Image (tube, rainbow, N blue to C red):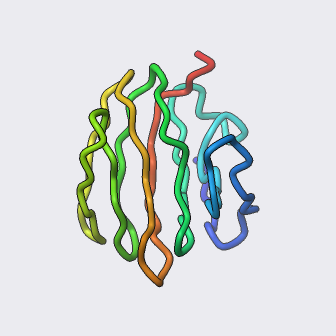
Amino acid sequence: MILKNNEEIDEVFVEEPGASFVKKKVLIGPEEGSDNIIMRHFSVLPGGNTPYHIHPHEHIVKIEKGRGVVVDYIGHETEVKEGQSLFIPGNEKHQFRNPHQEAFEFLCIILNPNR
């Protein structure tokens, strides 16, 4: 078993085209011996957003703190908040945005795309 303290995990800014003011921590992944599943923590700072992007792997997302907006494959915006969870199928275009004044934080669990 591997037990980690989230506060001790390095947090880095997401350096992808289209990302703005987004920080990420890989909580559990291949470095901990998890070959199949990766759990990440994202913090979208006020005014920030993830890229509006698409990829083959599905997501399970749990909103941890604050509120934000999820944009779906047709551009429809849905406000989400702490205590909600969502599923994003593979190959569905999506984006997370934070138009609010406080951080918007969520867990994102994916299958390892390198498998």
The location of residue 109, given as percent across then percent down, is 44, 42
Q: Name the quadrant of the C terminus.
A: top right
Instruction: Check the image and report above or below for 91 versus 53.
Output: above
Residue shown at 27% from the left, 63% from the top: 80
Residue shown at 62% from the left, 50% from the top: 19
Q: Which of the 4 quarters of the picture holds residue 22?
A: bottom right
Label count reads 0
The location of residue 102, given as percent across then percent down, is 47, 82
Residue closest to the eye, 62 or 6: 62
Tell me if 15 is positioned left or right of 29 in this view. right
Q: Which of the 4 quarters of the picture holds residue 20?
A: bottom right
The residue most toward the front is 75
Instruction: Check the image and report above or below for 1 versus 114.
Output: below
Residue shown at 46% from the left, 35% from the top: 110
Residue shown at 33% from the left, 52% from the top: 70
The residue most toward the bottom is 101
